[in-house]
Image (cartoon, rainbow, N blue to C red):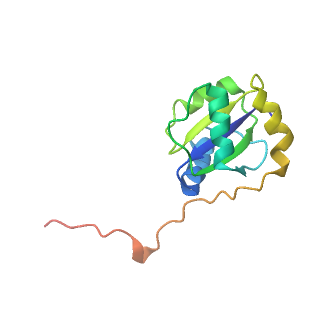
Amino acid sequence: MESFAVIRADSATKVNTALLDLRRYGRMVFSDVPKYITADYADEILTEVLSTQLRNKCHSAAVVPLKTIPSVAIGKLSRIHPPAHIIIISPKYDVFEELKSEISSFPKFEVHKPVPLEESEQPVQEVIV
């Protein structure tokens, strides 16, 4: 485990999409399954790592251990645009050891791939003659 990604969002759906984006577009390698964390805890991590006041509280959050080196993860993150706020936690932060020791106690976050629309639910395309 090289780092953690803490994902903060308005909803669990956006957290789910952000996790999929980390893998699909960021090509990040998870060293374990994503885990739920409370929104308050995610907000607390953000204020500690960035040493700044919180602008907006989140409503859903998750953490995932990464095999990706922190500097590489940050570089990849800057090239994708997930629908959530993602913080990369490296060993240089005090909260890294806290997350490392507590990660096994957090409940598993079930990542679901988007379900394709049924054929009958496909958007109707207008035909111009």
- In the image, what residue occupies the spot 63% across and 34% down? 46
Q: Is residue 2 visible?
A: no
The quadrant in which the N terminus is found is top right
Q: Position of residue 11 (x, y in %)?
A: 55, 55
Q: Please state the horizontal and vertical placement of residue 76, each as a whole percent of the image.
A: 58, 30
Q: Is residue 113 visible?
A: yes
Q: Residue lying furthest left in this view?
A: 129
Residue displayed at 59% across by 38% down: 86
Where's residue 49, x and y in %?
A: 66, 28
Q: Percent from the top left, x then y, of residue 71? A: 66, 23
Q: Nearer the viewer, residue 5 or 40?
A: 40
Tell me if residue 98 comes above or below residue 32 in the rendering: above
Name the residue nearer the viewer: 44 or 34: 44
Which residue is more in the foreground, 89 or 111? 89
| The quadrant where residue 95 appears | top right
Q: Residue at x 66, y 40 (%)?
A: 6
Q: Residue at x 84, y 48 (%)?
A: 104
Tell me: residue 59, above or below residue 100. Answer: below
